[in-house]
Amino acid sequence: MGWLKRVSRRMFGGNPLHEAAGAGRRSFAWLPSNPGAVAALTATQTELRTKSRDLVRRNAWANAALESYVANAIGTGIKPQSLVTDSALRERIQALWRDWTLDADAAGLTDFYGLQALACRAMLEGGEALIRIRYRRPEDGLAVALQLQVLEPEHLPVTLNTTAENGNVIRAGIEFDRLGRRVAYHLYRTHPEDGALAPMSGNGGMETVRVDASEILHLFRPLRPGQIRGEPWLARALVKLNELDQYDDAELVRKKTAAMFAGFITRLAPEDNLMGEGSADPNGVALAGLEPGTLQILEPGEDVKFSQPADVGASYAEFLRMQFRAVAAAMGVTYEQLTGDLTQVNYSSIRAGLLEFRRRCEALQHGVIVHQLCRPIWRAFIEQAVLEGALSLPGYVRGDLAKRREYLAVKWIPQGWQWVDPQKEFNAMLTAMRAGLLSRSEAISSFGYDAEDIDREIAADNARADALGLVFESDPRHDLAAVPAAPVPPDNPENP
């Protein structure tokens, strides 16, 4: 490397092209390492996950950030809309899916959309989540013999790095073939930190079981090419958030301690009782109390000095605000979502912040959750439904790839956003539709609804209103403003 430095000095006069590449006083103590994507997380993932879980358990701000992200990214669920051209078949697929979502959870605690939220939260808190596809027996009475089990990433040992008997390499618990494809996951039977407390611990201990990769969905956000495990989303905020929590707690304790001392009595004769004192604490220190409305007469030689504890200062709130902004930036949420503080926002500022946050959410929804979780589950659902006869899809079993793509075509619709000023947003959307820049179906999808379901509901509402002879101002078929008002009869018909 010495010849590179000599060449650099001759070409650039000894000055580095980048300030950070220099070796001067400001960079002398900066000695970073550059591990690969796999090595970096292998060395730090367990500790990062442990500290992330600890903060989420005991820190209100960390938990609020995760709750906000899950509520915005998942909400009531990212729902599928089949794109099969046959309307009757499409409706059968959608009806079967609605029935299956109620029984999707292998634990029976929630539905499919609740599992989405659970998996998303596990990914945010622990860096990743594992979803195991569990195929059931026909006699189990499910709409489709398929259920899902969400597992925490601790089930996948990050320390398992070896070569399998078949020649495949195992890195961080994941088995890869010679082409670099994931072929299996080696999982603990129970959570390694639960031990005998696990409901199905059995005698498995810390042994792992090999599960085919087709039955495991690995949900995590890839940040670097070649990354195979996930990083907790609180990683960049852990130190600052932990110290900020300690600082705020220390300020609270300091104020609480100072407030315990109302005043201090000075006397020349310690043996005399002053100010009506007649009691002492367990250590023998005399105490004197005060009651509301007391007028106390002081004897000669008595002096009272009231406690004046130091205030936190005018900069305390601003200091916390700046620190919380740094934490919010590290966690990928807005300051208002992290703290709930809306004192310094207006319509324009909060809308700009929400737009940026929602772009991040949309990237997470479509690039991670839909691609890694929703699409594989939809494929497994369709295939299992065809195999057990719950759906009849001609050409699917014979391996016609074009037919399979047609049957598997689906559009995933996240929950719609609620805007600060809906009237402005609706007017903008109406203008875009009239200008031909936005379809009505896409406008409906932006609110998290299926356009066909909305159309059927509107048609049913209109038919019911017509049958009952009802006319509403909300019905665009009737422009009540254009209907002339009925003439008012004059008071005196003979002299109008």
Image: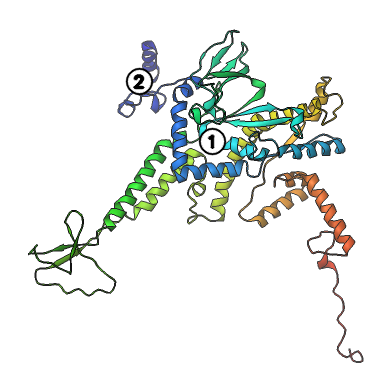
Q: Is residue 439 visible?
A: no
- The residue at which mark 1 appears reads as 124
Residue that sits furthest to the left in the current view: 269
- At mark 2, the secondary structure is loop
- Give x and y (percent) for residue 339: 47, 49
Who's the residue at 88% across and 84% down the image? 489
- The residue at which mark 2 appears reads as 14
The residue nearer to you, when weighing 148 against 414, is 148
Q: Amino acid at mark 2?
A: Gly
Q: Amino acid at mark 1?
A: Leu
The residue nearer to you, when weighing 159 against 278, is 278
Rendered image: mark on residue 327: none
Who's the residue at 35% across and 52% down the image? 316
Q: Is residue 58 left or right of residue 425?
A: left
Q: CA distance from mark 2 to mark 1?
A: 45 Å
Who's the residue at 9% across and 68% down the image? 301
The crowding category of the residue bearing disc 1, from other C-alpha atoms within 10 Å (few below 14, some 14 to 19, many at least 20), is: many
The residue nearer to you, when weighing 239 against 267, is 267
- Give x and y (percent) for residue 484: 86, 72
- Give x and y (percent) for residue 180: 61, 15
Name the mark nearer the viewer: 2 or 1.
Answer: 1
